[in-house]
Image (cartoon, helix red, strand yellow):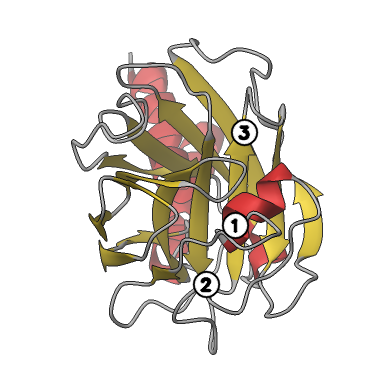
Amino acid sequence: MRMKSRHALVAWVLGLCLSARAATYPGNGKSGFGGPIGQGSLTLTDDGAIVSGTVTKGAGGFNDVLVLYIDSGSGGFSDTSGFTDSGDGLRKSISGFDGGTNRSVLTMPSGFLPDYAIALGPLSDRFGGLWRLSNGGSLSYLISVNLNPIGNASSPSYTFSFDVGEIGLIPRSGQSFRLFGTYVSNTGFRSDEALAGDVSGASQGWSPFAGTADAPYTIVPEPSSALLFGLAAFGAVFGRRRRS
């Protein structure tokens, strides 16, 4: 029994060192596009290096695009008025611009200046990716975020993931980023649905919207020196007892 207790304690201490963080963000309750995002939720977890997300769908089909803007460093953009990239549907969603004359300018929440955007279009574009934001006609594509499933608007949930290094953060650093999600078509036609924050504006359309809230997320830090010291000390004591 003593051996089992010691093994359990070791497992508990290791769990503290290596535990993943998790946070869940509800939608804003609105349903301009049927409610898949406004009445859904987003859960983020990480292991210190990879952030994994799960979008739990609300009412209606996930027919359009969830754009998650990410503020992870200095600088950034206070609105989308300078984004003109319309190279594909997901870029149009990030830009809020159809490539012609129609645009929905999104003003970011106060103090929120995103540098990156994740766009998830499981049915409309069958893809999810991460882009670095820039004014003008060329958003910088970085990586696929492994969106799953694709080609299906009625799945109860959708998963994606990305490396924190891709948004300029150091793995296991305990650094934070902020995020804000808006639900928009792949022609930039915006809904009133949001999650990890809220948005105000028309019920939906190519019209101005303003973010009214965003949300924080902190990645798992390195195990503290005190915790590692305690684990080492426990190992030394356990080793002496085994030899005695």
Residue under numbered circle 1? 94
Is disc 1 placed on a helix, strand or loop? helix
Near mark 3 (Cα within 10 A), the count class, few <14, some 14-19 or many ≥20, is many
Is disc 2 placed on a helix, strand or loop? loop
Give how far apart the Cα atoms at labels 2 and 3 are: 19 Å
Residue under numbered circle 3? 121
Is disc 3 placed on a helix, strand or loop? strand
Say whether disc 1 or disc 3 marks the residue closer to the N-terminus.
1
Q: Position of residue 70 (x, y in %)?
A: 51, 64
**Is residue 125 visible from the viewing direction of this image?**
yes
Judging depth in this view, the residue of 201 and 178 nearest the camera is 201
Is residue 103 left or right of 7 when viewed as pictured? Answer: right
Q: Quadrant of the N terminus?
A: top left
Near mark 2 (Cα within 10 A), the count class, few <14, some 14-19 or many ≥20, is many
Judging depth in this view, the residue of 67 and 234 nearest the camera is 67
Count the labels in the image: 3
Judging depth in this view, the residue of 111 and 227 nearest the camera is 111
Residue under numbered circle 2? 80
Is residue 242 left or right of 101 when viewed as pictured? Answer: left
> Image point 63% across, 59% down: which residue?
164
Q: Position of residue 120 (x, y in %)?
A: 60, 38
Give how far apart the Cα atoms at labels 1 and 3 are: 11 Å
Q: Position of residue 74 (x, y in %)?
A: 53, 88
Q: Which residue in the rendered view is the most extreme toward the left?
A: 29
